[in-house]
Amino acid sequence: MEVKCNLFPGGVRRALTMSYDDGAEFDRRLVGIFNENGIRGTFHLNSGKLGTEGYVSREETAKLYKNHEVSVHTVTHPYLTQIPDGQVLEEILSDKMALEELCRYPVRGMSWPFGAYTDHVIGLAEACGMEYSRTVKATKAFDLPQNFMKWHPTAHHDDDLEGLWKQFLEREFEQMLLFYVWGHSHEFSRNHNWEKIETFCRMAGGREDVWYAANIEILDYVQASRSLRFSGNRRMVCNPSAQDVWISVDREPVCIAAGEFRKL
């Protein structure tokens, strides 16, 4: 019996997630483009900038990002590698609590301001309850992260998204493949290239063979998949997590329900 933990929800092998920083007013247009195409993502916000000129308001935050995830980007966007530890903790934890007050759910992830981090800063972020953090290092690859606190995206939106998407769809390896795009919505206004993200979202959205998810959903699912417990001969499996997990058994998709013990 061939058993592989290589499927996302619904038994698909491909997932797409988006990741945008700062909370600029141009997020309104970007969220609209995502929603029109069934694409979901994560918006990393600086709570200290909300409601100031050029940024979304605190009052609209929960409604605007309703179908997406709100995540930490610190209160004031400093270089976390160049400030005292106490200030690092304050920047992350205060942002987390402010966003939780606005959105009414636990905020569990972040992206690194300026892409700057060290192993020491990662430890401080984890102490604040952060479970993942996105970097700015584009890999041009579709692998799942080994360390979610150093989560490298596939590409920035100014990269060749159409070419990478073609590679993504043509990849035949029997593994979970993740396409992860990051950027800032204000860049589209500055560079006068909104058509770039509009074209990509029309091309990538609405596919039955792709799972569209926020960053935290990718994390939760991968952790649930990795938590499956198999017998030595792989004919029995237990899913101790709180969510359904899909596996491949002799190349056929099988759903192992949350909390289920099953004989394969």
Image (cartoon, helix red, strand yellow):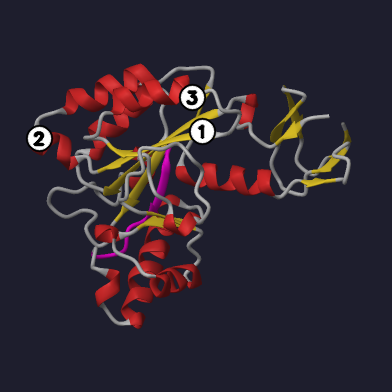
Near-viewer residue (248 or 45):
248
Q: Residues within 10 Å of mark 2 (few under 14, many from 20)?
A: few
Region in magenta: 66-76
Q: Residue at x 51, y 33 (%)?
A: 177
Q: Residues within 10 Å of mark 3 (few under 14, many from 20)?
A: few
Q: Residues within 10 Å of mark 1 (few under 14, many from 20)?
A: many
State the mark number for residue 191. 2
Which element carries disc 3, helix, strand or loop?
Answer: loop
Q: Which residue is mark 3?
A: 171
Q: Compared with residue 260, is residue 123 higher up or lower down, i.e. above or below?
A: below
Which quadrant would residue 13 be assigned to in this image? top right
Which element carries disc 1, helix, strand or loop?
Answer: strand
Q: Residue at x 35, y 21 (%)?
A: 36
Could you tell me how far apart the alpha carbons at marks 2 and 1 are, in whole angstroms? 30 Å
Name the spot of residue 224 as percent of width and height, x first.
67, 46
Could you tell me how far apart the alpha carbons at marks 2 and 3 are, in whole angstroms? 31 Å
Q: Compared with residue 77, is residue 181 higher up or lower down, i.e. above or below?
A: above
Q: Earlier in the sequence, mark 2 or mark 1?
A: 1
Near-viewer residue (34 or 115):
115
Q: Visible in this render: residue 47? A: no
Q: Which quadrant, please, contains the N terminus?
A: top right
Q: Earlier in the sequence, mark 1 or mark 3?
A: 3
Q: Amino acid at mark 3?
A: Arg
Q: Compared with residue 1, is residue 96 higher up or lower down, i.e. above or below?
A: below
Between tags 2 and 3, which lies in front? Answer: 3
Counting labels gives 3
Q: Amino acid at mark 2?
A: Asn
Name the spot of residue 104 as percent of width and height, x first.
48, 52
Name the spot of residue 206 as percent of width and height, x first.
44, 17
Q: Which residue is mark 1?
A: 177
